[in-house]
Amino acid sequence: MLQKTYENIDSIGRAILSINAQGVHNKELAEVIYPSGEKAFAQVIALDGDQVTLQLYGGGFGVSTNCKIRFLGKPIEVGFSDDMLGRVYSGNGQPIDGGPELLSDMVRVAGPSINPVKRLIPKDMIRTGVPMIDVFNTLVRSQKIPIFAKAGEPYNRLLANIATQTDADIIIIGGVGLKYDEYHYFRERIEQAGSKNKTIMFIHTHRDSIVEGLMVPDLTLAVAEQFALQGKNVFVLLSDMTQWSDYLRQVANAQDQIPANQGYPGDLYSQLASRYEKAADIEGAGSLTVLGVTTMDDVTHPVPDNTGYITEGQFYMKDGYLELFGSLSRLKQQVNDRTRTDHRSIMNAMARLLSEAEERVKAQKFGSVKDDYSLRLLEYRKTFQKELMDPFRYLELEDALDICWDILAQHFKKEEVGLSSKLIEDYWPEQEEQNN
Amino acid sequence: MQQATGKVHSVNESLVGVHINEGAIMNGEVAYIILEDGKRLKAEVIDVKKGKKVYLQVFEDTSWMKVGDPVEFSGLPLSVKLGPGILGSVTDGLQNPLYELGKIEWFLERGLEVEPLDNTKKWHFTPFVKKGDIVTGGSVLGSVPEKLFEHKIFVPFSIQGNYIVEQIASEGEYTIDETIAIVNDIVGKTIRLTMAFEWPVKKPMPFYERSVPTDPMPTGIRILDALFPIAQGGTACSPGPFGAGKTVLQHSLAKHSQADVVIIAACGERAGEAVEVFKDFPELIDPRTGKSLMDRTYIVGNTSSMPVAAREASVYLATTVGEYYRKQGLNVLILADSTSRWAQALRETSGRKEEIPGPEAFPMYISTLISAFYDRAGVEVLSDGKTGSLSIIGTVSPAGGNFDEPVTQATLLSTGAFWGLSRALSDARKYPAIDRIDSNSKYPSLLEKDEVSYLLELLREGKAIASNIILMGEKGITDESYIRYQKAELVDAVFLQQNSFHEVDGVTNPERLRFMFNMVKKILDSPVHLKGKGEIRSHFNFIRQAFQDWNYTPEGEDGFDKQKTRLLNLVKQMGHVAENV
């Protein structure tokens, strides 16, 4: 296709520039050519008559009015081949691990969503060995689910654990706004776990431009989708989507868009949704599961809030523990009736009692908790946290369920736990009850 | 008439500015933008500006569009094709059947349009009119059997004035595009009629005669049917933060509501949820009809990753189809999930048009649009004296779960029942997590009025005592108060809470609701002579467990009466314990 070069740049901002040009396509890929001959990618994001607005992969700093813009006559694409396994790429799709550039097929990025009729109802449990997930908020193949956590929580460790402890065929890591040591950590963990040859990384660190960061989820998901279409069960890790949303906000702001909540663009929901919705169990092919990270202070902040409406639940991490309240797996009902007959009921009973205990924690502050039942609830809460909430304690589901029954029997009488008589008969531990 | 043409002048995501070459432009008409590869992208005129400039919202991804791409205007507003064949189908927001699209491409590639209704299927038509009869818009020409009922074939509602039937098809098999009648007006103007016609989605169908919603629509969900009911033809909204159980509630309503037709508008929500419905429902049998649940269902899916501009269209499409089936004399229920996504789509477009924003950047006119949408629900008395109804239940997804935002507020002003979903309740696993205190409904309950206020009073009191317990501890309140508190907790646990995933407990028919309530009432009215908090709590625990076991037992099964007797014995014991001491 004909490539046209223009040199009459109108304006340059932090992440965008505008130029007069004709015959340019919306979303076309372009190159900024510096006077030194260096090049950086850019993409058309709006057209108005002859005025073309581009977002700059290399950022606006250092771009001068005597740079040239060459329109490449093609949309953004990403390479796709089996040889990419084990490799690390940047947000513009270039290898950054020192290895050779690959000649591979190119596939489209940010393509349309799959026809819902080609989706299967998710039905396979993914065993993670994390009791708070397997018992209480079961992960299901093709689920899209983020970890909600404050910055500084060990969410990347959990992410890496889940990815390497499960049976994924392919792991694709999309790192957005990573600190260098976090990137290093992922590489190391993947290598230690012997998963390197089934992993591809697209990494954006803080030294790279925000536009590259914005591209990471799209590249990651485009490659993942191709593997899924080839029948592979693919795990995508996206960390951290809050930073990604922040970049989105910056670019929207640079375009003078009217902000909605807290400066975020009005389409934040749609933007996040079009990425997370790539998760799918595809009829006659493989599946794509998305585990994200959403750093946050407060769950009502626009990013976790919009994310929660999009994803199929969330794992809420606090003080190094996976919390029961605030965590949710929307797909667990699809699978937890086919694990063990007590799974669903004990999950609910444990949660109800814990919620009762939380009430007592509030009351405790007033010094009003003195009765035996309330005190037992508080003890129950401690045991629960110690035995089950550590995300780094590996337990098989069945062992974790047995521990649940032991905890109940340790603190409660049979009639206090609200479980059906049948289940109690089948599962209540035989040891003598300790109620004093 | 020659339709207008134009050229693309600006592209900003889904908002495209066009310069008109020639021709008249109607606000709201459909236009097509032709890309250089020949793909035709459907769009709608949303603004006509001076200087022969119009703005389109494009229902597809605008990548690879360029300035100068030709635009063809249709002269017609965005419309839906109405006729037999809608029930049981799944379409996108522009009425493209998804299964048909799926035969062409795996992905929802842009520029694809498919016939909205199957035009090869033959329907068995029975005429109701004969040559020489006088007909007008809305007259019934005949009927065809569709799934569960006789589908009336109308003279299109847009036709005004009287026409004489010149020719009518005899009983037999026809497709929806075959002419089944020819009618003439007095001056000899002739119209050929088929079994299907089009109607603009944004134009409410006029009521023949409007009436008010009074008949309850049982939903099978106890807390709704007893405390916060919806009527046939009524409106309700369920705002709530994410994770409070909106989706499960919607699915339960879609399965169990006693409506003839259920239309699900999956607007800007997860694709997976719509998939669950249209892959599960064909397998599920509706106990009321003995047929597949899908037979009464129509799904419009414009899920969150599909083009944003079509979200609005999907809501209106669902509503128009609903109005059409109301004209058939049926009780129709629309589940719109979520109206907030529709409002957000409007906000996106409004922002791109650089309109002056209202609160939280929503357009100023958002409340008017929301009210007008819910106003399309209602009860209609038809020309033959029969009634049809259209009920709308909309979910709202308020930012941060805070109801004090424009969309929730506008919705509360427009709907008759408010089901506030609460994260505190869902954290406590008290499903459905509908706030027992703050929710309300103006429609009649399946219970008597004084029974409803009796329950609400008890719940309010229970809540007050609960907060006293937190402050002062169980020891700080009297046994009497503690019993009252336990009663309120019991009502909540065994009557209001319901396990939607349980075959028996998940749906409660009106008869069972009645005798469950009678049992609740009996427990509440029975004397309690228990002494001490421990004894009270433990006895109520036994009753709760027995009641829950009963809730899980199908009627007519052996255990059912046995469990009832057990429960009654436990209730009797409450009064005896003290006497024994």
Image: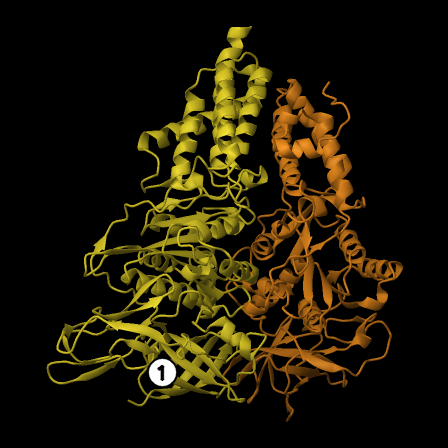
Chain colours: A orange, B yellow
| Residue with the most extreme bottom position | A2
| Residue with the most extreme front position | B558
In the image, taking residue B367 as reference, residue B41 lies left or right, namely right
Q: Check disc 1: other Cα within 10 Å, few if <14, some if 14-19, many if 20+.
A: some
Query: Could you say where residue B379 lies in the image, as x and y percent from the top left?
Result: 27, 54
In depth, the one of A110 and A132 nearer the eye is A132
Query: Could you say where residue B344 lies in the image, as x and y percent from the top left?
Result: 47, 61
Query: Could you say where residue B38 lies in the image, as x and y percent from the top left?
Result: 51, 89
In the image, taking residue B129 as reference, residue A116 lies left or right, namely right
Q: Residue, x 56% and y 83% (percent of image)?
A: B64
Question: Relative to A104, does residue B548 appear above or below in the rendering?
Answer: above
In depth, the one of A179 and A387 nearer the eye is A387
Q: Amino acid at mark 1?
A: Ser
In depth, the one of A281 and A307 nearer the eye is A281
User: Where does label 1 land, which residue?
Assistant: B74
Q: Chain of mark 1?
A: B
Q: Quadrant of the N terminus of chain B?
A: bottom left
The reply to whether residue A431 is visible in this rendering is yes
The secondary element bearing badge 1 is classed as: strand
The reply to whether residue A61 is visible in this rendering is no
